């Protein structure tokens, strides 16, 4: 039950006035999970390449050097936005609900992207050097940015941490921000994230709990909404975006066996096929018509 201890710690930190900062200190100096290793960074760079490929295949007919990319929920190290810059993206607008980016972690990313040059001394340098506007704190549900001002929206492993109602509002805001013909590329990790920390857990462990029970362990700092693939795709359509790519991964045979052995909460017993329930990663591309 190692995961319960971690969940309890993060839930407790989440309700403290400086919980985000304390969690950062814990992750960096106690858990030592930050900065992420080079292999993790390389995976993020590969995901940035996948987003750029989605832009080139489905976005407007505009060179990426002239395009405006928008990303919400960019995290601590800005690995993907900096990877975009290395791949030639000329202008980016980054939004985060909390000012989470840390100069020391940004510089760790820069050290792994040698073509971008040396470290920064402050986040304010990002705009001049890389065309990156970092706006935090700013609510992605209502950014106040001009309508039809971006060509491309990207999100990587963020949507699973956003409550469903908030996510619906964020998708609507993405529709407002996109120019007609603009594209939205998204990757969502649908697995129980505590299974990465506790190898004894099934990747679907969190599907066994009722909403009430899950609220007791679900931390504001590590929130997991437990939405399944059809739920996300429905929210995209309801936002007025047109899906052009739907790429669910999983479940494999072992995943189906895990689901069959799991005592599912009532919320997950009806309305989903085993294949829908067991999707582990969902990638999609949508466009604003």
Image (tube, rainbow, N blue to C red):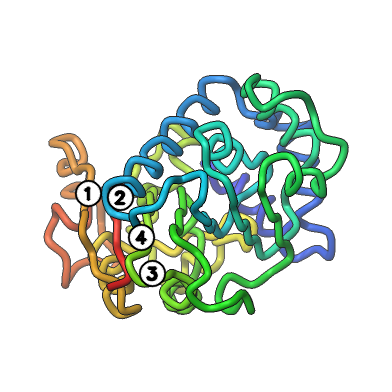
Can you identify the residue that label 2 sits on? Answer: 283
State the separation of the CA atoms marked 3 and 1. Answer: 25 Å
- Residue 133 sits above or below residue 43 on the image: below
Reading the chain from its start, which is encountered first: label 4 or label 1? 4
Question: Percent x, y for residue 160?
Answer: 44, 58
Q: Is residue 209 rendered to the left or right of residue 169?
A: left
Disc 4 to disc 3, how far (Cα)?
Answer: 36 Å
Judging by the rendered image, the residue that carries numbered circle 1 is 248
Question: Dot 3 corresponds to which residue?
Answer: 210
Query: Residue 21 location in percent, x, y?
Result: 80, 51
Q: Residue at x 71, y 27 (%)?
A: 108
For numbered disc 1, what is the local secondary structure? strand
Q: Earlier in the sequence, mark 1 or mark 2?
A: 1
Whether pointer 1 and pointer 2 mark residues with C-beta atoms closer than 8 Å, the reply is yes
The picture places residue 25, in percent across and down from the top left corner, at 80, 41
Name the residue rendered at 52%, 27% in the picture. Answer: 40
The residue shown at (26%, 73%) is: 234
Q: Earlier in the sequence, mark 3 or mark 1?
A: 3
Drawn side of residue 58 relative to residue 141, left or right = left
């Amino acid at each position: 039950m190692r995961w319960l201890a971690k969940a309890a710690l993060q839930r407790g930190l989440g309700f403290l006035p400086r919980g985000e900062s304390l969690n950062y200190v814990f992750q960096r100096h106690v858990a030592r999970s930050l900065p992420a290793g080079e292999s993790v960074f390389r995976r993020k760079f590969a995901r940035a390449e996948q987003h750029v490929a989605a832009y080139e295949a489905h976005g407007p007919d505009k060179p990426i050097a002239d395009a405006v990319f928008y990303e919400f929920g960019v995290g601590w190290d800005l690995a993907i936005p900096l990877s975009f810059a290395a791949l030639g993206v000329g202008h980016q607008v980054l939004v985060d609900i909390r000012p989470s980016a840390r100069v020391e972690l940004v510089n760790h990313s820069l050290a792994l992207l040698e073509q971008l040059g040396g470290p920064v001394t402050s986040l304010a340098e990002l705009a001049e050097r890389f065309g990156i506007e970092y706006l935090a704190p700013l609510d992605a549900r209502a950014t106040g940015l001009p309508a039809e001002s971006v060509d491309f929206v990207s999100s990587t492993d963020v949507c699973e941490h956003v409550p469903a109602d908030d996510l619906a509002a964020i998708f609507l805001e993405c529709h407002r921000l996109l120019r007609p013909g603009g594209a939205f590329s998204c990757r969502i990790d649908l697995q129980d994230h505590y299974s990465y920390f506790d190898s004894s857990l099934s990747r679907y462990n969190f599907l066994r709990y009722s909403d009430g029970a899950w609220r007791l362990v679900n931390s504001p700092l590590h929130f997991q909404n437990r939405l399944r693939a059809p739920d996300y795709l429905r929210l995209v359509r309801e936002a007025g975006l047109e899906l052009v790519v739907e790429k669910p991964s999983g479940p494999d045979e072992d995943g189906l066996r895990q689901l069959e052995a799991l005592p599912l909460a009532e919320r997950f017993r009806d309305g989903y096929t085993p294949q829908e329930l067991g999707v582990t990663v969902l990638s999609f591309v949508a466009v604003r018509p």
